Image: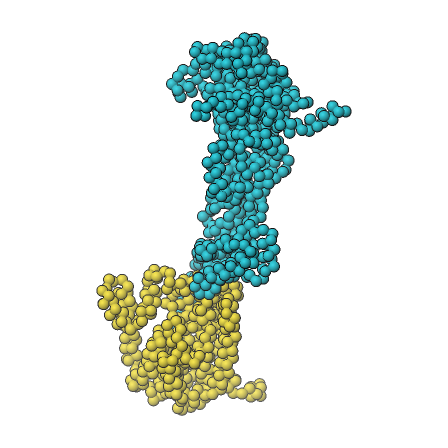
Chain colours: A yellow, B cyan
Amino acid sequence: MITLTRLVPEPVRRLHWIMLPAMLLLIAIGTMFIFSACSVRDEEKLKDLYVGHAGSAAAGLVIYLLLACVNYRNLLRGSWLFYLGAIVLLVAVLLVGTKTMGARRWVLGVQPSEIAKLAVILLVAWLLGRREAARQAESYLLALLVAGIPVALVLQQPDLGTALVFVPTVLAMLFVSHVSPRLFWLTILAGVMLALVVIAAIVTVETAQLSPRTETWVRQATGLTNYQQDRLANFIFPARNPHSGAWNKRQSEIAVGSGGVWGKGFRKGDQNLLGYLPQNVSCNDFIFSVLAEEAGFAGALAILGLYLLLLASVLGVAISCPDGVGKLVCVGVAVMMFGHVFVNIAMTMGVLPITGLPLPFISYGRTCLLTMMVALGFVQSVAIHGRQAAARF
Amino acid sequence: MHVHEFKPFANWRIVLLGLGFLAGFGVLGVRLYHLQVVKSGALEQRQMRQSVRRVLLPAPRGRILDGHGRLLADNQPNYCLALYLEELRRPGRWSNTVNAVDQELDQLASVLRLPRSCPRSRIESHIRQSLPLPLLAWEHLDDAALARLAESRRAFPGMDIFVQPERLYPMGRMAAHLLGNAGRSGFDQTANAEEYHYHLPGLKGRSGLEKEYDDLLRGIPGGQLIRVNAVGYRHDDWTSRQPVPGRDINLTINSEIQLSLENALAGVRGAGVVLDTRNGDILAMASAPTYDLNDLSPAPSPEFWRSLLEDPDRPLFNRAMTGCYPPGSTFKPFVALAALTQANLPPSTMFHCDGSFHLGTRVVHCAFGERHGDVDMRKAIEVSCNVYFCSLAQLMGYDAIVAVGQQIGVGRRTGLSLAGESPGLLPATAWKQERKQENWSMGDTCNIAIGQGNLLVSPLQMAVATAALANGGTVWRPRLLRGQAAGEVVSRANWPTAAVELVKAGMQDVVSGEEGTGRRARVAGIAIAAKTGTAEYRVENVPKKYGWMIAFAPAEAPRVAVVMVVEEAQTGGLTVGPRLQRVLLTIFADEIAAGGKAGAA
């Protein structure tokens, strides 16, 4: 027995054997349903998006395995550089980015906002996870600053959904690290107040008869663009605009609901086939509608189960990791992933307003897929190297 | 030992996060259950409603055949060129697609060498109103056009031949009033029509038998479901219910007799009916002038329709059953029958005719100023003596005439299964009181006795009455549809055989006697009983005459009753006699041929 285990190298033996297959399974399912969603497209090029997805996944897997072999503690020393790189890209996207549907999100074929999510997680974990950072108000404020800069830049694109994902991620990391609890609760309180004020402002604009000047002032005071305010208002008041703005929401609900318990069968989803789910969102933001229609309640539940398994594994790695940096990396990655999954699926079922958050591993989107795989690569590294002696930074 | 140092990263906080995840997934699961299990049916309905269009498919219309299986109304395919827009669609604005269709139509026009019949505006309205259905760009493609199309089919995507049913009347003008016409139906008015989004045009009976038996002929329409995509183009379709073809109907009409009757009426205004005296089957029924049914199918041109409506001869008017005429002397046999059966007067009742009958200040003359001298009942029928019948009516009273008139169905619809039948008029004494505030006078009785005055009958009624006389008193409900059952008896008059035989003998003399007014209807080898009639009427104070003739044959064992009326005639015998003869020649063609051979042998 002993000789047999000796044959397998140490890192491979320590590999987390649930996380990797769960991730690969989700990617495979994603590839399948991107194929299904895009098969109805007119342009030949777009029919082959699933190949691109699988290709990105292959590249991602290589990076994932490489990361798994390397001790994350060594890598995180360079998190400042990674962070700076992400900030540079975020600034670049504002200057020279490709504009689609009113927002600049791409530069050089990548979405810097996706990379920034991971960069923030790694840097905040590095700042808060080391022993010397504990219980210092300065490190707390530094963490907020580290998260705040990319959030501000992402809001400029504008991409509210992505910007909002930073918030729970960083808050969860602050919560677990227990740095300056008083400031933490103050932040939470301030955040809730801010959200309430924004919602109150939108409700006021919508219901009260304000003079144009006052209305403009209130609208500007929320700090949101008119488009974002409209979307929120559409969500709070569903009857407000039953036709234009709510089309995707309604069609997505119909898709999910008409799938029934067992679904309509692979590539037989009418909503996608007949174009009621717009083709430009069916393979990314609304891929879950396609999946739920074709695979039904059973299939959708299975997907939720896979995500839960993956998230539980990540948190399990966090619990078993002896040092704070490893724990925080895992917590950050888990919360970021959960945020995407929850917001995306809730959006397709009409529970949350429509935002452009992709469904991790399943939605088409190379930057997102690679980022998520790299993130899990770090978690895998924590799983393998976390228990190695002496966390010395 | 490191526990104290890493207290900030307490694992319970991570577990708490995990529980938060669980709660989040719980919310998702509940919503998923709500949508995919609880509301699944309703959302599936919504999905169907927004993407499925129902189309009503007309069933193939039943045909109409004559008594010998000859086609009177048939269906013929109308080959249309159909464009399926979902295959011609262009991304972007609608006008891109309209342009693409427009260009294809131009190219097709040059290939077909036909002028374009579908303007751009129709493409636009088609896209707006019935996008999932094919656009019919040309109709009635002939063989040459179809051949040219077959050669270049590959070059035109989204193009196909679409076959629409159309009504064809192989015999053209024949029995036009009876058959009526079927035109393209617009919106089907059936009970659940509103459940359908679109209706493919079918055929709908507009008049005559086509209208009367529309339910039978139309069959049961089928349903087609078309799935449309979000833009409204057809995605696919399937037939949800096969149409049930309409039933063929077999008429009692005999095309040869019908044609002969129509030919006999050619060039005049008038009508004729040939009835089987044994069961009430209508062997022929015609009204002149007539028109070609194919000119009305699928829809008449407005000019043609106006010309039909404005024609002073009123070709659309079915004189055979809707027309009402005073029967003139053709009523006399029934008056004689009234005297014999109701007043029990003997056939030997004699009156002296000196050419005129005086009643107070009024005088009734016999035709052509003839004086018939002493005449009995049989002779009176043969020579059609007005003086005799006025005297007879005076003797027996009006009630006897009314009784027989009612027995033979005057003033009552015969019950033909065709809309528009006129009941005629058998004036009661009270009728005149009501209408004209005058008492019934003996003069009125006298007028009715010679078939004038206010007495009105339709040719069809007269045919039923003649048949009743021929078969000894059975009044049949005339029928047009051949059924399994024997005919339907409306009533049976209880006439003594002797009385009927006397009247028949008088009517035979009308044709065969030296002085008979119906001599011109003679047919060698066939004993014919007949009565002529001439009724006067005025059009803008110009006196005119209706010429009548009723007949049945063979006299000894009657099979057919023939009735004809011609407007603006000289007299019944002169104008109608030879025409009726032609019809009889056709009816008895076989017997005449056999008799001729027998004679030759």
Q: Judge left or right: residue B51 versus residue B148.
A: left
Can residue A132 be seen in the rendering of this structure?
yes
Image height check: is A194 above or below A119?
above
- Quarter of the N terminus of chain A within the rendering: bottom right
Q: Residue at x 54, y 87 (%)?
A: A9
Q: Residue at x 62, y 27 (%)?
A: B582
Image height check: is B391 above or below B24?
above
Q: Which quadrant of the structure image shows residue B486?
A: top right
Give coordinates of residue B550: x percent, y percent: 57, 23
Q: Nearer the viewer, residue A303 or A98?
A: A98
Q: Residue at x 77, y 24 (%)?
A: B601
Q: Which quadrant of the structure image shows residue B66?
A: top right
- Quarter of the C terminus of chain A within the rendering: bottom left
Can residue B549 be seen in the rendering of this structure?
no
Give the tally of numbered discs. 0
Q: Nearer the viewer, residue A142 or B199?
A: B199
Q: Nearer the viewer, residue B140 or A228?
A: B140
Q: Judge left or right: residue B367 versus residue A103.
A: right
Q: Nearer the viewer, residue B164 or A342?
A: B164
Give coordinates of residue B365: x percent, y percent: 50, 14
Give coordinates of residue B508: x percent, y percent: 62, 18
Give coordinates of residue A147: x percent, y percent: 34, 81
Image height check: is A65 above or below B240?
below
Q: Residue at x 53, y 37 (%)?
A: B291
Q: Judge left or right: residue B394 versus residue B151.
A: left
